[in-house]
Image (cartoon, coloured by chain):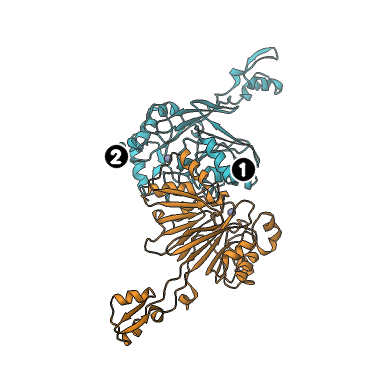
Chain colours: A cyan, B orange
Amino acid sequence: MQLQFLGTGAGVPAKHRNVTSIALKRMNKQGAVWLFDCGEATQQQILYTTIKPRRIEKIFISHLHGDHIYGLPGLLGSRSFQGGTEPLTVYGPKGIEQFVQTTLQVSATYVKYELNVVEIEDGTIIEEDDCTIEVRKLDHGIDSFGYRVKEKDRPGELQVEKLRDLGIPPGPVYQQLKMKRVVECEGKTLNGEDFLGEDKKGLIVTILGDTRLCQSAFELADGADVLIHEATFEQNSEEMAYEYFHSTTSQAALVAKKAGVKELWLTHISSRYTLEDADRLEKEARAIFPNSHVAYDLLETVISSVNEKS
Amino acid sequence: MQLQFLGTGAGVPAKHRNVTSIALKRMNKQGAVWLFDCGEATQQQILYTTIKPRRIEKIFISHLHGDHIYGLPGLLGSRSFQGGTEPLTVYGPKGIEQFVQTTLQVSATYVKYELNVVEIEDGTIIEEDDCTIEVRKLDHGIDSFGYRVKEKDRPGELQVEKLRDLGIPPGPVYQQLKMKRVVECEGKTLNGEDFLGEDKKGLIVTILGDTRLCQSAFELADGADVLIHEATFEQNSEEMAYEYFHSTTSQAALVAKKAGVKELWLTHISSRYTLEDADRLEKEARAIFPNSHVAYDLLETVISSVNEKS
Ligand SMILES: [Zn+2]
Ligand SMILES: [Zn+2]
């Protein structure tokens, strides 16, 4: 999977940081793209990427604040205008359906694809062949969800050499073994488990909406390959962060550390901080969790498991 | 007055043209700015201008298509966030109130200024000390309004030399004469009318929403100093323009010519045309109305009456 940050700012747009949106490129057969949040001008940011709006299959909204949803109607409309015909589903807190319906209806926007809107509650909201998504409420004054995307583990490679050494010729039996079945062949009893490499661990990506430091964050981030956490304020502004239901750089790093994640990306940076401040913010987080990074608009990063990396 | 085009594209944003918004800077004491339409990312475009959101006093929406309104909730919210406390009024077709209310309500956006929304019908919608605004429906499938902004004429300068020659000393009588009153002074009967230069003609600016070539356009543009007319398509695409309720470059120029305006600005240019195509589009219009210009994003232009120019 790959991540691309489309907007990394908080509240109001700045020249150097647009309001929030994150693209998760599944890198599967369909080339599916999932968006997390869709602040105003997300479709304009997409013009500077290789993302095709028609490839966007799902949009997950963390919470209903304007800096996370005002780009939704425009993107939904343009996706149709630009020839998108595949279904699209928007997930979000209660209220998202009214927002989508009213904005499209008032503007006489009729999309030419199947548009579904799903209002979510804590729990598993997606259970697909290759991945699951679990959500949980955070602490942001209004309902704000964190998403934990977990790819399913895939069986390891079939150890063909080992089978050849035993004199088992290639054929349908190989397929059976790949599915971990026990089969009889050439007078031998073979267990698939014995001829498969280690399972390929599915990646875990946790993307949290705006939040104070809270328990759900630790749970959603547990053992994730990548955690994306808001860091609206710097380390010293903990009181302000609390007052406005946001987090600091250090609090985000603490979650990453305690949850045992592999990599932390900080986003939703207040417009009070310049691009030059990013180094300082990054250092604050790294003091607690070394593999911390401050995102910037349009940044792309590949998510790979530790085995793949080594 | 000054005009600044914040977005000059049609339907969907392109890198080189954002969707529609136009700022009219009144250049009066308050430094008031009025917006006409507010497509998505208008507040982002404003970051590249000297316009302060708190100075925006009125926003006029021509019609409810997404490319003209999706930037409204973000701008209204940010204006409050950035300290705007003066009242603001949004004018637009029936439906604009539901759009504003729902988007702000769903997103829990509470602005800290008095926000009024006025749903308009054909007629005079504003009658202020220094100007009036008249609107009329155009021809765009859904209700789309054209706006005619007319500054009131101001009395000419008091001809002080002439008064001095007659031995009339400066004093309260000068104020009376400025107001065109008849006064007795130094044994003489003086009529203000005789001591004032020519009236300063109030400027007329006509800004039309999306439309086919239609009669209302001619009436709203009659004798205007500046006409802003959509030109979604080139000259040869008249059929397509008709089908989609839009105008061509030549149709816009025809309105300018027949209405006897002084200057024509073309905007709402389809994203199919590159910035390089603008020259060609401009030439098409100039063949019919020589003082035609194709707008581009962030362009500023001063509106002055012919007398002031000469
Ligand atoms: Zn936010
Ligand atoms: Zn339009």
Question: Quick one: label 1, few (<14), some, or many (20+) residues within 10 Å?
Answer: many
Chain letter, disc 2 residue: A
Of residues B156 and B80, the one drawn nearer to the viewer in this rendering: B156
Q: Does the beta carbon of the residue at mark 1 sit less than 8 Å from ligand 2?
A: no
Can you say which quadrant of the picture contains the N terminus of chain B? bottom left
Sequence-first tag of 2 and 1 = 1
Distance of label 2 from label 1 (alpha carbons) = 43 Å
Q: Secondary structure at mark 2?
A: helix
Q: Does the beta carbon of the residue at mark 2 sit less than 8 Å from ligand 1?
A: no
Of residues B241 and A301, the one drawn nearer to the viewer in this rendering: B241
Q: Position of residue B109 (x, y in %)?
A: 43, 41
Cβ–Cβ under 8 Å for marks 2 and 1:
no
Q: Position of residue B125 (x, y in %)?
A: 50, 57
Say above or below: A283 vs B161: above
Q: Position of residue B80 (x, y in %)?
A: 39, 47
Name the residue that disc number 1 marks. Answer: A54
Residue A236 is labelled as: 2
Q: Is residue A4 left or right of residue B288?
A: left
Residue depicted at 41% across the width and 44% down the height:
A11
Which quadrant would residue B52 be assigned to in this image? bottom left
Q: Position of residue A47 (x, y in %)?
A: 55, 50
Question: Quick one: label 2, few (<14), some, or many (20+) residues within 10 Å?
Answer: few
Residue type (three-letter) at the residue carrying disc 2: Asn
Residue depicted at 44% across the width and 45% down the height:
A296
Q: Are marks 2 and 1 on the same chain?
A: yes
Quadrant of the displayed image that contains ligand 2: bottom right
